[in-house]
Image (spheres, grey):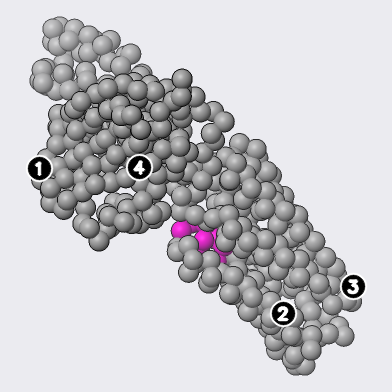
Amino acid sequence: MYSLFPALVSALFLGYGLYVVAEKGFNRISSSFLVLCLSTFFWQATWAVLFQVRDPVLADILVRFGYLLIAFLPTSLYHFLSEISGYPGERRYVLASYALAAVLGGLALGSNLVVAGHYDYFFGYYPKAGLLHPLHVAQTVVVVSRGLYITWRQQQVASADQRVRLRLCIASLFIYFFAAIDYLCNYGFEFYPPGVAFLVISLGIIVRAVVKYELMSPVAVAASVAHEMRTPLASIRLQAAAIEEYWPLLHQGYEQAVRHGLVEARIDPATVQRLTRLSQGITQQVDRSNVVIDVMLASARMESIDASSFGEHAVLPCIHDALERYPFSAGDRERTRLGQLEDFRFHGSDALLVFVLFNLLKNALYALKAAGRGEITISSTRRPGANCLSVTDTGTGVGAEVLPRIFDTFYTTKKAAGAGLGLAFCKRVMTAFGGTIRCESVETQYTTFILEFPPIAR
């Protein structure tokens, strides 16, 4: 009878973990959640057997194996929260906590320092705390508190939709704290341990966040990674600035040393020119990377476009800004031209429209590369019913069977290079502007994306 509850809980947690991985695939967040669920599954399955056995020797083996898994449980929760929040620099602390958990787990298996045998309670055998068991309790308090802190910090600066997800995690964590009541049973207090019920509720909230609020969406993961890339890119930019500042002095010193015969002239003039342009090239690459990050973050926020900041903007400055800032590869800019351009005003966000153009340019350039030919034309026209902005490429075109799905989230024909987010983002932006986006294409000939904006009433 007493084994029924842990048996049901173990099955539930196994289902939690497998469901999330099946739904979201393997990524850093879903993998850490799977580790959390598997630890709980094996722990509770062990307790279900433990409460049934009457052999003290077998009971001793089971309590030690069960505590090996319990040793990792708080850290696995902390690991999951660190991945969800994307808090910078947290990984080294997670690894340190796993190392301590491994030591405590090893001691639980091979000595009486963490688990000193077992109690014989009315519901069955249960682990007895050893001399170092308080260290495990202290670790649990520290890592769960740290997880709560970093999640709370991140929700303060998160976007609206991400804030909801993180607050659900915080609520889950508060409930998780109540599971610590089970530790009293390790110190001789005889009652049926109810803590796992709190764990079920706690992780149930997280599963709800997964299902309803896309907690483990690959978009959110991409946004976290993109945010983390800004710091090293900023550092590279500063180093490029230092090269640009001090290279003339170093070069001047080298030339004087050559003139006075102190060193041989081993650097040819072409190399000197390349070194002179080095810092400028690094800066350009950093700027290109930052543009890519901007697009990733904009796509990641496509569920929470804030229309309250919309205003009236002209379309031509957006076109020129996009062409100036887009990270064209060598020769690509020359294949991109401006067609008929008529300026008009639209209600929305100029920054979001630039990101839309970035996505359309990226797709068009991909089509040109796949076709090995073609060019891109950007045009804008004023019409009585709707103002239009179009991007046309004469690349591979889009097949008729694919065309109806190209604006679906996560649908992509770029098997090795696409995530299926760009066009879904474009559609969401245009809907927020009160406009539309559609695609006309003939396979092997051309593709045209037409953005229609409602005229601004005067």
Q: Quadrant of the N terminus?
A: bottom right
Alpha carbon distance from label 2 to label 3: 19 Å
Which residue is denoted by mark 1 in the rendering? 373
Q: Position of residue 255 (x, y in %)?
A: 17, 10
Callout 3–callout 1 Cβ contact below 8 Å: no
Instruction: Please name the residue shown 57% across and 51% down the image.
Output: 84
Residue 177, image quadrant = bottom right
Nearest to N terminus: mark 3 or mark 4? 3
295 or 276, which lies in front? 295
The secondary structure type at the circle numbered 1 is loop
Q: Image quarter for residue 109?
A: bottom right
Q: Earlier in the sequence, mark 4 or mark 2?
A: 2
Q: CA distance from mark 1 to mark 4?
A: 25 Å
Q: Residues within 10 Å of mark 1 (few under 14, many from 20)?
A: few
370 horizontally vs 165: left or right: left
- Residue visible at 88% across and 76% down in the picture: 191
Between the C-alphas of marks 3 and 4, the distance is: 66 Å
| For residue 70, side relative to residue 432 (left or right) | right
Q: Which mark is residue 437?
A: 4
Query: How far separated are the C-alphas under marks 3 and 1?
Result: 78 Å
Q: Of marks 3 and 1, which one's residue comes earlier in the chain?
A: 3
Disc 4 residue type (three-letter): Ile
The amino acid at mark 1 is Arg
SS label for mark 3? loop
> Which residue matches tag 2?
6
Q: Is residue 406 above or below residue 383?
A: below
